Image (spheres, rainbow, N blue to C red):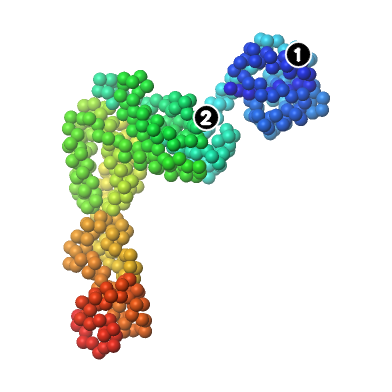
Amino acid sequence: MPKLLIVDDEETIRVGLTSMVNRLLPQWEVVGSCEDAEQAWEQVKSCAPDLAIIDIGMTGMSGLELALRLNKERPEINKIMLTGYDKFAYIQTALRAGATDYLLKPVQRDELVNAFAKVEELLIERNRQSKLLLEKTVLEWTMTKKDESLILLERLLDGEGLLDEDVRYGIILRFQYRNDPEADSRRVESPEAYWMADYEKSHRGLLKTVDVVLSNVCEMTFVAGRELSELKDWLECTEQAPDGKTPRWAPFGYGEPTEDLRQLPSAFRQAQEMLYRSIQPLDESNPDEETVRINRLAVAIEMNDLKAVNDLLNLWRRDLGQSSERHPVWMFGRLIRFVAFFVGLQATRMPSALLTEMNADITRLSGQLLFNGDPVTLLSTIDQFIEKVAQIKPDSFDERKIIGKVKEMMRREYGNPDFSLEQAALRVHLNPTYLSELFKETTGRKFIDYLTDIRLDEARRLLLETDMRMYEVCSSVGYTSSKYFSTLFRKKFDVTPTMYRDGPVLETD
């Protein structure tokens, strides 16, 4: 409800205008009635009116001076000037002071209604522009993380009273398109605009929602509220259309609510990962075939089998093209499934050197689905993705080079008691089991045996060349138990560490 402030030094005028507005314009709320400009200024600061009706000829600070001050410090407030003289000079002065209109005393009902209609049009346009600016700013900060976007977002939210300490913010992403073979099979529907409107009306804790259409099938919603814990329960009920008849496939994802606007980009990434994880296979004639292919592709990527990956990608691409010919909407579902598979692998941080090489292209691919929902364009983007994968050179994750890196790692980390096969696998983006097999195949020795030899050879050097105490030598080569260290040392060199230091010892290779 827009708010009105009346400023006039005559009480009868103030009372009369209040009565007329309440009767003729019930959509407006009179939030203040002031007899002078100083009192009006205090009211402006406390109640932030959308419109002020101001008498030009007040004593003290004149109405014109108040209007000029509002122009400078509160330009968002509209102004209608009151005057008792129908003279061009007064009218011209009022308009120069930034008034949207003027009214002659005594105020006529039709003139009052017409003047308010002009202001309401301005408010509608202002709200539209503010909404567009807020949508643009939320999108820019979430996507680009530019400092100026964050500053503007904070200012816009502060102007709406949404920058309090107890306000939380969140990001929701949602896919939406029809999945009904009996419906129009040649068309993919756009998202349903402002789909959270009903929830916003019924839930008092939700203070603001800003919907940004990212593409013709994906919508982002920025939410601000004092209580967002019930939001998840409501989201899980949105897969059914409002009419209760038309099923919609509407996977969604959301980020953890945050009190810090700087965390919105992270919330967006969380929402994106959850969105892709929520995507399920469509009910097609043979879903098992796709599931088998997905499992094979996941194994090939984890095993860094570039040839198998390229073969499976080309096979999947062929099937996508055939789906396009059979049913466009089903094809779009499979396109989403294709992208979701790779984003899912990326999100799980699968230990694969090949996946690491693919990550940049996966990020570009997932962005295309969010920001360009056109199936033809997306299919072209998938083609480009497959071509990029085909251009990856095996040398970039050559197994011999990987084992060389692991050996160097052992020589650096032998003194770290926590260093393990799992740690090494994580650093070279390989599955621990696969790294263990690859290490033995390449070197002819087990990982732990190779690491133990490095540690014990270094211990032997320290025993001969330093005066370090036994427990210090033990700790320096990565062992926390002196007894275990001594057992390993004796097994390798046929003597205890103490006997080796005391010598003489006949050394053998």
Q: Against 79, is 459 above or below?
A: below
Q: Quadrant of the N terminus?
A: top right
Q: Position of residue 35 (x, y in %)?
A: 77, 24
Q: Is residue 328 left or right of residue 147?
A: left
Disc 2 residue type (three-letter): Lys
Q: Quadrant of the C terminus?
A: bottom left
Pick the front one: 176 or 149: 176
For the point 23% across and 87% down, the residue is 505
Disc 1 residue type (three-letter): Lys
For the point 48% across and 38% down, the residue is 169
Name the residue tied to disc 1: 105
Mark 1: which secondary structure?
loop
For the point 32% across and 65% down, the residue is 419
Other-residue count near label 2 (Cα within 10 Å), few / some / many at <14 / 14–19 / ≥20: some
Q: Against 133, is 441 above or below?
A: below
Q: Position of residue 507 (x, y in %)?
A: 21, 84
Q: Against 114, is 131 above or below?
A: below
Q: How far apart are the two marked residues, 1 and 2, measured between alpha carbons?
A: 37 Å
Q: Evaluate if marks 1 and 2 touch, with contact meaning CB atoms under 8 Å apart.
A: no
- Residue 302 appears in view: yes
Name the residue tied to disc 2: 131
